[in-house]
Image (cartoon, coloured by chain):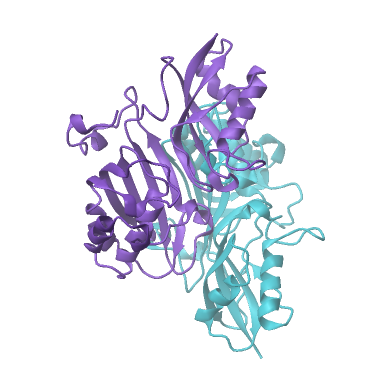
Chain colours: A cyan, B purple
Amino acid sequence: MTRRIRIQLEYDGTEYAGWQLQRQGERTVQGVLEEALNRITGENVRVFGAGRTDSGVHAMGQAAHFDLPGNIAPESIPYALNANLPDDIRVFRADEMPEDFDARRHTRGKIYRYRIYNSRINDVFLRRYAWHIKYPLNSDAMQSAANFLVGKHDFSSFQAADCAATNAIRHVYMAHVIRSGDIIDFEIFATAFLKQMVRNIVGTLEMAGCGKIKPEGIVDIMQAGNRSRAGMTAPAHGLTLVKVFYADDPPPPELAKYIPDSADAPI
Amino acid sequence: MTRRIRIQLEYDGTEYAGWQLQRQGERTVQGVLEEALNRITGENVRVFGAGRTDSGVHAMGQAAHFDLPGNIAPESIPYALNANLPDDIRVFRADEMPEDFDARRHTRGKIYRYRIYNSRINDVFLRRYAWHIKYPLNSDAMQSAANFLVGKHDFSSFQAADCAATNAIRHVYMAHVIRSGDIIDFEIFATAFLKQMVRNIVGTLEMAGCGKIKPEGIVDIMQAGNRSRAGMTAPAHGLTLVKVFYADDPPPPELAKYIPDSADAPI
């Protein structure tokens, strides 16, 4: 007898080869969670994530599901797991879900944040969590370019070459560039994302920020449907998965207002 | 021919046995700076810090002086040093000073910040930079206790047993407890500090925050002049040296207003 459990967790991705096991012997978040569940239950429990964060990418609000044997109360699951996890992963919530719940298929959107530290000399406390860019970036130009991302588009130009997605149509609800002093945050809220989509978008926004392209140049890049036209893939360590939404844990009103029509809402 | 240079720098203290070399073979901030200066100049240059941060303590604004041979322009010194330093130390400013300038003796006060993360489950991004306390703390009670620290007092009760200071009279200008969500910051601005003084104060504020003592109980503890009456030494990793002030780089107006009388100002 098992129950389907959804957990929400944060992790510092610095020491991980991403969420999912790629090559034997690499340390992954999924692998470390499965080891912890094995210690708690004595059984092999497979963990399914809402999204497969790349090597070095962080999470403030990743979600995952698994089938848990035994009768531990959901509110005790974070403590039981954390006692068996390294200190760079913390599970902060667990819920019992219907047995057909799927952490990936049932999302109602996700928010990612990409952080740039834009100053001649890097900040030691941000060195693991932001892309250091020394030359000045125009965040207004970056916002102007980001505005063209909003809506339902073919994002092939921002798709990793080895991306397995069958089509590249995604719906971006919100794409904000927020400058606070030397920190530039790019926040993007979408139904779902292609592999390395946020990092490839940020590499292109950087081109708008330093004047290599005009903000509206991002439209040509999107229409070309060709990865080689877009900017570089921004480094992984600037990226954080902020939150995964579900029907029972939906976007707050300040985000829900960006969803134009419930008919367009993701599954 | 050398020039006396003052540098200002930040560091993540996690991987250091403090500022100053204690035992052979330990990695210290001073030692790493001296190695970098040796690579740049080909000579042995001794570095003198404004304060000797303990093992694991961080700095956003440490200061130090040294006598630099050669003719590198002051504005180039941060870049030359940073190119020879690990990424957890960044020098962000250098100034040529009078030849008798002393980074420790000539300070006009320092600010330290001690950060507590007060939540049942720790935050992975703060695990190296804040003391995790699971039980709820009353930050108003902590502020009420902190108010008694302000002024010129004998701080023997908050002095490390092996502190070399000849007297324990120090002038605290400001002692603020600021709660933002689950983060409690204690900011203290004083002429100078005794060894482990801030960490010992925070261990005592924690007693007020969890109700072990009343806020005014800190007065008895101070008057006892006895280290054993005060709280535990709060862990080093929550502490950050925020800024060291000098005559040419004085406290900003919002801090200077706490200095009651210029006759009381430190040397």
At 56% from the left edge and 48% from the top edge, which residue is drawn?
Answer: B14
Whether residue B185 is visible to the viewer of this picture, yes or no, is no
Residue placed furthest toward the left: B261
**Can the viewer see residue B231 in this picture?**
yes
B125 with respect to B167 (left or right): right
User: In the image, residue A162 lies at what x, y percent?
Assistant: 76, 50
Q: Is residue B3 left or right of residue B44?
A: left
Q: Choose between A12 and A209: the one closer to the eye.
A: A12
Q: Residue furthest right?
A: A24
Task: Count how many numbered circles sit on residues in the image.
Answer: 0
* Residue situated furthest front in the rendering: B166
Q: Is B141 located above or below residue B19 in the figure?
A: below
Give the position of the C terminus of chain A as an image quadrant: bottom right
Residue positioned 66% across, 69% down in the render: A33
Q: In the rendering, at what x and y percent does residue A168 appear?
A: 66, 52
Tell me residue B67's x, y (percent): 52, 18
When asked about the image quadrant of residue B214, the answer is bottom left
Is B142 drawn above or below residue B243 in the view shown? Answer: below
Q: Quadrant of residue B84?
A: top right
Q: Nearer the viewer, residue A243 or A149?
A: A243
Q: At which x and y percent is residue B20? A: 54, 38
Q: Nearer the viewer, residue B38 or A46?
A: B38
Q: Quadrant of the N terminus of chain A?
A: bottom right
Please name whichever residue, A8 or A33, is drawn nearer the observer in this view of the structure: A33
